[in-house]
Amino acid sequence: QVQLVESGGGSVHTGESLKLSCVASEYLDRTYCMGWFRQAPGKEREGVASIGNDAITRYADSVKGRFTISRDNAKNTLYLQMNGLRPEDTAMYYCAADVRYKALARMLLDDEYNYWGQGTQVTVSS
């Protein structure tokens, strides 16, 4: 059972940056698809960014150009660099992983992932 632990959340102002990290309890080779999801109060969980086989990435339209997902397999760690944060980015951010191959169109769907972290809160104030 893979365990994922997120960190790096916090409270910032509009335009500032945060970098989230997600450490896996075991080695996840590049065959694992990993992603970041978020859920704001009263809203459904949504996919933010994903990195799959061969480092293919996919981003939600709302974060393109501002967020960057990356992974360091040697450190069993997934990252999400978030720049230009906005109040609408406020949410609980979750890390997810899954070994199954995913088509590009499915990389941001939460039902495609089996392993989830507990989340880290990001709050952006104006």
Image: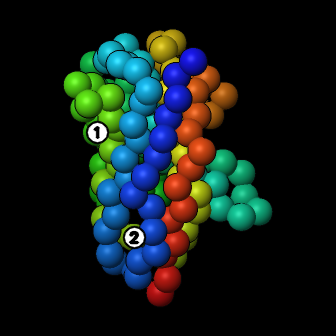
Residue ranking furthest to the front: 25
Report the front residue among 52 and 64: 52
The residue that disc 2 covers is: 85
Give the residue drawn at x 71%, y 51%. 44
Give amino acid for label 1: Ser
- Give the label on residue 38, or none: none
Classify residue 90 as left or right of residue 83: right
Relative image position of residue 72 (x, y in whole percent)? 25, 32
Report the front residue among 66 and 34: 34
Distance of label 1 from label 2 (alpha carbons):
18 Å
Report the front residue among 122 and 59: 122
Classify residue 11 as left or right of residue 45: left
Relative image position of residue 124 (x, y in whole percent)? 48, 75
Secondary structure at badge 2 equals: loop
Q: Is residue 12 above or below residue 10?
A: below
Relative image position of residue 5 (x, y in whole percent)? 48, 41
The residue that disc 1 covers is: 70
First in sequence: mark 1 or mark 2?
Answer: 1
Asked if residue 112 shows in the view, the reply is no
Relative image position of residue 123 (x, y in whole percent)? 52, 72
Give the residue drawn at x 32%, y 75%. 16
Give amino acid for label 2: Leu
What color scheme is it? rainbow
Secondary structure at badge 1 equals: strand
Give the residue drawn at x 58%, y 57%. 92
Report the front residue among 40 and 109: 40
